[in-house]
Amino acid sequence: MADRSFSAGEVEKFCYCPMSWWLSRSDNTTQGENTSAGTLAHEKLSADLSNLSGKQAESVLYSRMIMYYAVIATALAAIGISLVNFDQKLMISRILLLVAVVWLLLSLSILYLTRTEVYSRKRLTERLILFLATLSMVLSIMSVTILQVNTLLAEILETASLIWLIGASSFLYLDLRVEEKALRLERSMNISGKIVYIGDDSHPVLVSENRSISGRPDFIVESDGMLMPVEFKSGRVPSGPLFSHVIQISAYCKLVEDNYGKRPDFGFIYYGTKRFAVDYDDEVEKLLMTKVSEMKSAEDAGNAHRNHNRPGKCLNCSRRNICPERLV
Ligand code: SF4
């Protein structure tokens, strides 16, 4: 059992420069426009992610409502069919037929208008929902015309069936609208998948099994059954992921594995809208744990020092003004 846990952010600082991490322990203020710009960017990101997550949850709710309404409408229509009598022709049947045809055409129009990208995103179960809704409409038409329902109970059932179909069609319309908005947001943020965790106060801090690492990734996305942590970085866009950021995203992968029971194959780092997939394998996990162990040793020793000779690093360091070992 570890004596204390280091946050993934601390691990990132340590990997950038141990002195930077050491100074951050006693001084929570950082300097520079980059830092405040980064805070603002993260606040905006958090708001955008909440918005996207809300749209995705709404879409799931509407899909369920479509299924609920469509199944009940189908059941009502089927019961109506079972009560057929071939002797009478009622005006009400003609009216119900007209309404059913209108709703059928409306639904087909909605499917046609959204047949492209949004529709293709629907999973098999959602396609089944749409099929059920259409099937129930056909059943209604059959029950009030070809089979000529002639009992009061059958007429009531068919009327109820049509009302439920109207409900199913309404939820279908709402679902497709929300899905389109979610798709636009995902595109603008270059994200694909379902948001299952956002690293703000609405979600708990994740802690590793041995309690040596903790933290909140910017968010966790689920795609094809795999969970992947994502970290956004503001500021300059490098040609490839920086070492300290690679170790930080590895720490988040470790947290995802320990908290969700699924080991990610990789995590994502975004520099602006430029995305890098960072592999999470045994080697990088070992390196992560080595760094955590070095942090523990530095803490026990009561000091940490600069471990590089790169003036550029110091130039970009947010603690340069209070650092006794800075190179520039
Ligand atoms: S100024 Fe340089 S030596 Fe000091 S903490 Fe920053 S990177 Fe490290």
Image (spheres, rainbow, N blue to C red):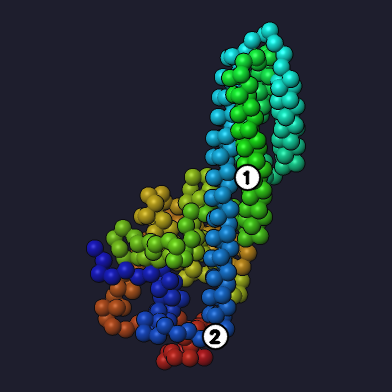
Percent x, y of residue 253: 43, 58
Residue 46 at x, y percent in the picture: 54, 65
Q: Quadrant of the N terminus?
A: bottom left
Residue at 37% across, 55% down: 259
Q: Is residue 52 above or below residue 59?
A: below
Q: Amino acid at mark 1?
A: Asp
Mark 1: which secondary structure? helix
Left or right of 122 in this view: 282:
left
Residue at numbered disc 1: 175
- Say which quarter of the image contains residue 74: top right
Q: Is residue 27 visible?
A: yes
Using the image as rendered, state which of residue 78 and residue 244 is in the foreground.
Answer: 78
Q: Nearer the viewer, mark 1 or mark 2?
A: 1
Quadrant hosting residue 125: top right
Which label was assigned to residue 32? Answer: 2
Q: Position of residue 322 (x, y in %)?
A: 44, 91
